[in-house]
Image: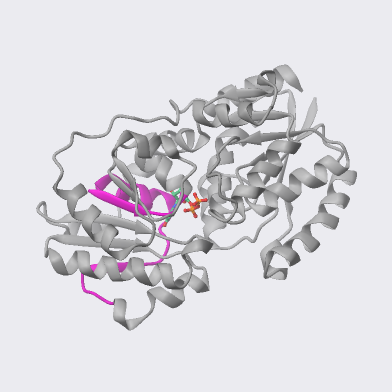
Amino acid sequence: MKKIVVSFDTRPEIIKLAPVIHELERSAKFDVVKLHTGQHDELAENMLNLFKIVPDYDFKSMSSTSDLFELTEFLLPKLKEFYSAEKPDAVIVQGDTTSSYLCALAAFYVQIPVYHVEAGLRSFDNYNPFPEELNRKQISNIASLHFAPTSTAKQHLLNEGIDESRIFETGNTVIDALYQIKKSDQFHVSRPEFLNSLTTDQKLILVTAHRRENHGKPLSKIMEALIEILNADDSRVIVFPAHPNPKVREVLNNKNFHHKRLNVIEPLDYLSFHHVLEQSDLVLTDSGGIQEEAAALGKKMLVLRKTTERQELIENGFTKLVGSDTEKIVTETKSMLSSTKKKNTFNPYGDGNAAKKIVEIIQSRI
Ligand code: UDP
C-alpha cells in the first residue's frame, strides 16, 4: 500500500481534487492522507461537505497569515514536521496557489515525489495572474509527474524541456466534478428560488471577479460597465456572487454601484451556482475554474483579465479577453448578447474522466 498525500487549500482546489481523492480512495492500493492547508471558511466548508471530504490535517493558514511572506513563513515549518511524521510516498498538488507551491517545495526539500494536477497552464506574464503564474512554473520544475488538462498545456511543458514520458494529457478534473454533481439527485432539488422570478425575455448575465489584479480601480471600472450594461437595456439582469475578500467587498458595497437589476449576492453554494450558470446568457468572469465550466456548458463569455492561460477559449471565438476596460466590456456584452452564433460546442477540458486517468497513471508509476 502506498501512502499518498493530497494537499488542497482554496475552494477551486477542493472542487478539482475531489474526483481525484474519490478515485484514489476507491483503490485498495492507496492510503490517502488529506491535508487542508487553508482556512475552514464558508467557501471551503461548503465544498468539503458537498464532496464528503474530511481532511486528516487542517493547517488553517489564513487565520494566522495576512500576506505571501507570512504564509511562506507559516507553512514551510509545518510542512517539514508533517512530511517527517507521515513519510508519504508521493504528494499531489493542484494548480497554482502559493500553498500548492509551498507543499511542492517542502516535498522537494525532503525528496518526496510531487505529482501536479492541472499542469502546464501559462499566461507568460508573471504578474498576471499574480502570484499564480510563477507558482505554477515553480511547481513544474519540481514535479515528477505532470497531468496536463489540454494539448496546449502539454505543449507548454514540452517547450520548457520536460521529458514527454512524464507528461500526461488527461482533461481537467473540474469537468469530472461538474458532470458528477449535475447527475446527482441533490442537484435537481437545489435550484435557487430567485431564478423562477426571471421572465423568458430577460437576459441573465453572471458575473464573478476576485483576482488580486482586479482589486481596487479595475473592479470599479468593471462595476461602472455593469451599471452601463443595465441602463442600456431593461431586459438585462445581473447576478454577481461576491467573493468574501474584503478588497472585493469594499468596491461592491460602494453606493454608486447600486442598481435594482444588479444583484450582488453572497457566494453561492456549488449546486446553486451551477443552476445560475446553466440559465445564464453570458458570463463575465476573471475566475479560472468558471472559464472552464462555462466553456464546457457552451456559454458565451468575457474574461475580465489582461491575459489568460486558457488561450484555447479565445481562439474559439465564444470567449473574449476584455480586462477591466469599461467601454470594451459594454461593447462586447452588447455584441455577444445580440450575436446569433450557435451554441458553443467546443470543450477542450475533457470528458469527465480525468481523475480516472490520473489515478491509473499514478498506480503504474508510483
Ligand atoms: N463557485 C461556486 N460558487 C460561487 C462562485 C464560484 O461554487 O458563488 C465555484 C465554481 O463553480 C468554480 C469555482 O468555484 O468551480 C471557482 O472558484 P474561484 O473563482 O474562487 O477560483 P479560481 O477558479 O479563479 O481559482
**Magenta segment includes 263:** yes
| Res. 121 image quadrant | top right
Residue 49 visible somewhere in the drawing = yes
Is the residue 51 above or below the residue 224 in the image?
above
Please count the marks in the image: 0
| Image spot of residue 3 (x, y percent) | 79, 32
Classify 18 as above or below 347: below
Residue 175, image x, y percentages:
45, 34
Query: Which image quarter: residue 255?
Result: bottom left
Question: What colour scheme was applied to this rendering of the protein?
Answer: one colour
In-image side of 265 versus 146 (left or right): left
Determine which quarter of the picture holds residue 83: top right
- Relative side of 77 to 358, left or right: right
The structure residue drawn at horizontal position 16% and vertical position 57%, both measured from the top left corner, is 198
From the viewer's perspective, tell me whether residue 299 is left or right of residue 118.
Answer: left
The image shows residue 227 at horizontal and vertical percentages of 24, 70
- Which of the two residues, 261 or 82, is positioned nearer the viewer here? 261
| For residue 114, above or below residue 277 | above
The answer to whether any part of residue 280 appears in the image is no
Quadrant of the image containing the C terminus: top right
| Residue at 62% in and 26% down | 158
Front-lying residue, 355 or 313: 313
Q: Closer to the camera, 238 or 346?
A: 346
Q: Residue at x 71, y 17 (%)?
A: 364
Q: Residue 269: say if magenta.
A: yes
Residue 336 at x, y percent in the picture = 21, 48
Q: Residue furthest left?
A: 201
Residue that sits furthest to the bottom in the current view = 255
Q: Give the magenta range.
A: 258-287
Image quarter hosting the N terminus:
top right
